[in-house]
Amino acid sequence: MRQSRRRPRNRRAQIAAVAAEAFSATGYHGVSMDEIAARLELSSTALYRHYPSKYALFRAEALRLGEVWAAAIRLPPMAANWPIEQRVEHLLEALIAASITNRRSAALLRWQGRYLKAEDRAAVATNLTAVAAMVRTLLGESRPELDASSKSVLGQTIQSIVSSIGDHHVAFPAKTLALRLREACLAVWHCELPPAESAAALHVGRAAVPPTFTHELVLKYAVILFHERGYPNVSVEDIAAAAGLPTTSAVYRFYHSKGDILAAAFRRAAEQVSAAIGPAIAAADSPAHALTALIDLFVAGSFAERELTFVYYAEISNVPLEQRTRLRTVQRLNVQEWAKLLSAARPELTAAESRLLVHTAQALVVDLGRRFGSDDPACSQQRVAHLMRTVLVLDR
């Protein structure tokens, strides 16, 4: 006798969760309604009964995540009588719990929010702005010596720590994950930032690309356009025009496709990170010193290639699968080498905990770059490197 399958009580919530995970993993443009239906073992017709379009599904989950973050910062009525330390602990616990619960869909807002329509993007931004304001408010109460720009930098770093777990798949029991995130947040909350630098000292010059280096011009302008518009909204014709090439065919003399251009840019960045590891270890007298040298190089490279660091996280799902697998492997090996140094400097950490902290420290460089750029005195290379060391708890 054939048994009928019982329909879940909240089919819409199940659909939204599966779709959010798919959007986070392969990008909004990389997922179709048919693929979402297949993951749920639903017919496309059944899926459309719940959501009339892919955008409706994307929008619903993005708005839900924004509301999750807004709910996390609401202190209970009795909090008015709590000491500031208790309110800070409550806030961090609530933000971390929300992040862990929604880890598999967190990258949707971090990297795909640009594809929301203006009205929906504004609604999400309102909630995220409220989170940032609450973090800054409590920072100001607990550390009245901080100026406004320092509160903004520390607040953004704490938000980055909490949300960065959506960018990787290091497996952890929730309790251990919460403990390490809390430790990193509190280390940043109480850290002493180096003095802000002058605007003149911050300027990061870009190496000029000679006009005869056509393949370099293509890479440069492709990354700029991908950053400004999003990969799906840029054509090879757009890249050729931005690079000053006479025809689109000039691009194809160097790269097979738009995805090949993206992969080439990522491959170069990953190889630069890899190439720095051996010399840093050889020149250092301890694992902590080697890791400090790598941090300085990583931050300098990120400041010089702000667009690329964002595009890597936001658009890697658009790299052809075979090349994407190789890039992920190189990235994983780089993280493992950093984590080995961290474990040697902090023997109390497990290998997984070291990898988690390395991912967290590297993510904050990207997030601070998105928020402050490369020319804000409040967020200099010196300060960003110090915050990375603080997250890794090397400055103790």
Image (cartoon, helix red, strand yellow):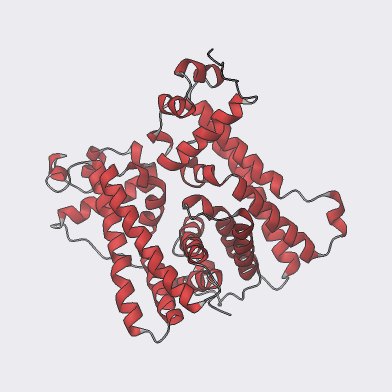
Please name the residue shown 60% across and 36% down the image: 63
Please name the residue shown 49% across and 57% down the image: 367
Q: Relative to the observer, which residue lies in front, 391 or 175?
A: 175
Residue 171 vertical placement versus 5 (above, below): below
The location of residue 79, given as percent across then percent down, is 83, 55
Please name the residue shown 87% across and 53% down the image: 78
Please name the residue shown 85% across and 56% down the image: 80
Residue 338 vertical placement versus 89 (above, below): below
Q: Relative to the observer, which residue lies in front, 53 or 180?
A: 180
Q: Is residue 284 visible?
A: yes
Q: Relative to the observer, which residue lies in front, 240 or 1?
A: 1
The location of residue 261, given as percent across then percent down, is 24, 48
The location of residue 273, given as percent across then percent down, is 33, 66
Left or right side of 32 for 126: right
Image quadrant containing the N terminus: top right
Image quadrant containing the C terminus: bottom right
Q: How many marks?
A: 0
Left or right side of 191 for 218: left
Residue 21 vertical placement versus 279 (above, below): above
Residue furthest toward the top? 1
What is the quadrant of residue 308 in the picture?
A: bottom left
